[in-house]
Image (cartoon, helix red, strand yellow):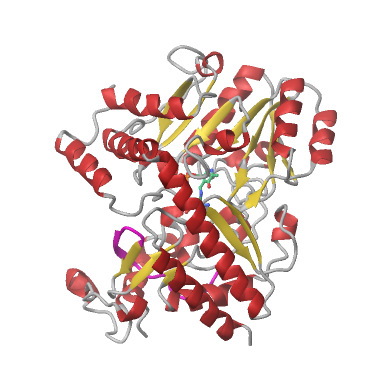
Amino acid sequence: MSRSIRGVHDAPCAGKWGTILGQMPRSMSISAQLQQRAERLLPGGVNSPVRAFRAVGGAPPFVVRAEGQYLWDADGNRYLDYFGSWGPMILGHAFPPVVAAIQQAAARGSSFGASTPTEADLAERIVRACPSIEKLRFVSSGTEATMSAIRVARAFTDRKYIVKFEGCYHGHADGLLVKAGSGVATFGIPGSAGVLEETAHFTLALPFNDVTAVEEAFAQHPGEIACVIVEPVVGNMGCVPAAAGYLHFLRDITARTGALLIFDEVMTGFRVAFGGAQALYGITPDMTALGKIIGGGLPCGAFGGRGEIMDLLTPLGPVYQAGTLSGNPLAMAAGIATLEYLEAHEAEVYARLEVASAAVADGVAQEAKKAGIAVTMNRVGAMFTWFFTPRTIKDFRTAATSDVTIFGRFHRAMLEAGVWLPPSQFEAAFLGTAHTDADIALTIDAARTAYLTIAG
Ligand code: KE4
């Protein structure tokens, strides 16, 4: 069955893989054939588990091209993209200034393993946007950013324990896969196999938005907690904002106890505001982890904070941290082009994202209400989630009351209509500047039809 929007159908891309797929049953879609091949080579056929669609069912389309708000799969179907590579594509796919910047950088060589001018160029842009960051270091993923920030925080405070929150995901470093959210929450795995109990021991995983739990943790571990790491707007249990005053409470208790406050802004950085959640809420964390948007779609993360903290890093100090592709010239070029555009068009971009996100998030939620389907919608700027539950969602426990079976049916129905939502109830959806009012109207129409099919 065609999965196209308005019947728009590009020529399938079988030709490109004709030789490889030749031995596959011709009745299968090209994506299905590619999935079969991929599963022989890659666990689950993927390089990141959520892409396997296990949380929603059905077969994942294989993307061969993207432009603006659209993705095209190997069978030529076009989709409206509401996950945007999990956040980076705030300006849409193949944004011309970013493409040009990558092409020009690639023509000068793709990686040197030596210092380049562009690393400081991008760092200057980030520091200007996030004044809490006096110094930063680039890495190649959000996982590396949070992992490294925690190492520095432990060295700076000479303390062992860290606090994270259930349902928050900070990448897959061992000490953070302790009741993490995102993929782990999606698969209902409390932590992960392979993580040592001894490692998990030093991670206190607390309920989000719960003041008492944090006060009790600090009371039980006086002088022992190195840092609190938090997604200032949680995206990895679905979108869950902090309760009023909660982030200020975390800022106060960490300052009072000598623990560092780490804002994991890998998702929220440059997403919910140009200066991230710390600008949106007016809070100065001690350290910040970044990723996604700062790489403009190429592998890039960063961690930063006060100079006195960051100067503990080698070669200045005793905290070792390194990376072959850290500050990669292509990623720097893509990040610079992205942040340059966002900074030059800040008011216009974030106003548009706010209006468009409100329209689609509220519109789809309204259609659920009309269909008599319980949906709770949370949104902060251009990140939002429709939870299939009547409950108010304020932490992982309430998020977990969502009906993931209904969500799966909704996801599949929307995909059939050419609207590609994040393939998990416990992920945030994202909008970019390429999404038009017509796209939003189409999305709401598709939701209205989808609810008719899942209500039964
Ligand atoms: P990466 O290592 O995937 O670049 O970043 C880890 C990370 C850290 N912090 C936050 C707040 C994050 O959201 C992430 C990664 N986000 C997930 C999606 N929720 C990436 C998608 C995936 O795992 O495939």
The correct choice, above or below, for 59 with respect to 219 in the image is: below
Report the front residue among 49 and 127. 127
Q: For residue 78, what is the image quadrant?
A: bottom left
Return the residue nearer the eye: 404 or 211. 211
286 and 172: which is toward the camera:
286
Quarter containing the C terminus: bottom right
The structure residue drawn at horizontal position 40% and vertical position 68%, both measured from the top left corner, is: 438
Residue 196 seen:
yes
* Residue depicted at x 74% and y 38%: 245
Q: Give the main secondary structure, helix, strand or loop, of the magenta stretch.
A: loop
Front residue (pair 30, 406): 406
423 to 260, vertically: above or below: below
**Residue at the extreme left of the image, as rendered:** 107
**68 displayed left or right of 411:** left
In this rendering, does residue 427 appear at all? no
Q: Position of residue 336 (x, y in %)?
A: 32, 34
Whole-percent x, y for residue 364 in the image: 56, 70
Residue 89 percent location from the top left of the image:
39, 51
- The reply to whether the magenta stretch includes residue 59 is yes
Taking the image as shown, residue 311 lies to the left or right of residue 138, namely: right
Bounds of the magenta span? Answer: 55-69
175 vs 227: above or below: below
Looking at the image, residue 119 sits to the left or right of residue 376; the answer is: left
The number of numbered badges drawn on the structure is: 0
- Left/right placement of residue 203 relative to residue 174 reads right
Q: Residue at x 56, y 73 (%)?
A: 408
The quarter of the rendered structure image containing the N terminus is bottom left
